Image (tube, rainbow, N blue to C red):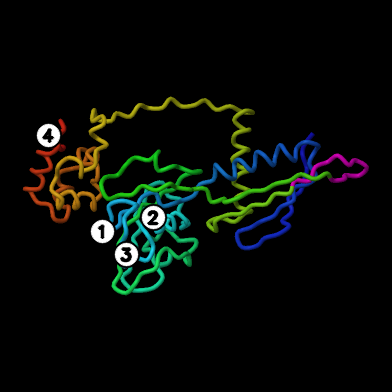
Amino acid sequence: MEPIFEINDKEQKDNYGKFEITPLAAGYGDTIGTAIRRVLLSSLKGAAITSVRIAGVQHQFSTLKGMKEDVLDFLLNLKRVRFNYSGEEPVKVKLVVDSAGEVKAKDLEVPGNVKVANPELVLANLAPGGKIDAEMTVESGYGYVSSDEREKEGVGTIVLDARFSPVERVNYKVEETRVGRFTNYNKLILEIWTDGTITPREALTQAAKILVSYFEQMVSPKKAQEEQIVSDNGLGPVGKLSVEEIGLPTRVANALVKSGFDTVEKLVRADKNDLARVRNLGEKSIVIINEALKEKGVVLNA
């Protein structure tokens, strides 16, 4: 029997939406409600801050002169910043404020393809003479990822728990409804709260498409393509070391990090000409880098 039912928008308010899906055959209210809820909370793409470097701060239990909040409270506020960003590559976001008063999410300096969804969120309060100079990494992803599951990024970088899901909360309930003389049909009432980067209706549509794709695989299975094994260039654990961990002078390490060559793996893969163009690096620095790498059993590309 082909299902025919309606989806009615009962209420739309800020980032909240209430929908009625009816009439559904007996039992399908819970079947659809459970599936949609799980997908809404775990499988929609979103963006969040995953790491942060703060000038003058080495770890999350530090304090920052001139900032009324502890660094830990500041980090908790950063986790609440929501972004419109659907790219695949991590992007850098900066926060440089040196005036007294409230520091808000709208003060973040973001690339053109990134937008802050909650600009009025207060991140910190600065006293006269206080300053915040921070750089954050924003990534897109799914669900919730603990900081323990993320790769450490070197001294001075604080890795954050990341809640990527754009859906904050989902409720549903099932009521009986009448169709003609039959009274055992279901009415599914669905409530969705989002973070402002997506509307509740868009979230519902995306969740339904995801479920359809899974069921389509059952109906018309597609063969999985054999994955090509990607070599790690024989670097092993050494490749994951940060440039701060291989004994480079602070000036050289900082220059490399700012230019994106923050791990041994990236250094080894880099072209020497690209390294030579890094600001504050010269031929002598290249020699120093190569000597440090040789002690770890690897060398720069010729």
Secondary structure found at label 2:
helix
At label 4, which amino acid type do we have? Lys
Which of the marked residues, 2 or 3, is nearer the chain's N terminus?
2
Residue with the mark numbered 4? 294
At label 2, which amino acid type do we have? Leu
What segment carries the magenta color? 177-188
Between 78 and 16, the one lying in front of the other is: 78
Secondary structure found at label 4:
helix
Which of the marked residues, 1 or 2, is nearer the chain's N terminus?
1
Query: x, y (%) of residue 222?
Result: 55, 28
Residue depth check, mark 2 versus mark 3: number of the one nearer the observer: 2
At label 1, which amino acid type do we have? Gly
At label 3, which amino acid type do we have? Ile
- In the drawing, does residue 225 fall left or right of residue 179? left
Query: x, y (%) of residue 227?
Result: 41, 27
Residue with the mark numbered 1? 56
Residue with the mark numbered 3? 132
Crowd rating for badge 2 (residues with CA inside 10 Å; few <14, some 14–19, many 20+) = some
Q: CA–CA distance between discs 4 and 3?
A: 38 Å
User: Any magenta on residue 138?
Assistant: no
Residue with the mark numbered 2? 72
Q: CA–CA distance between discs 3 and 1?
A: 9 Å
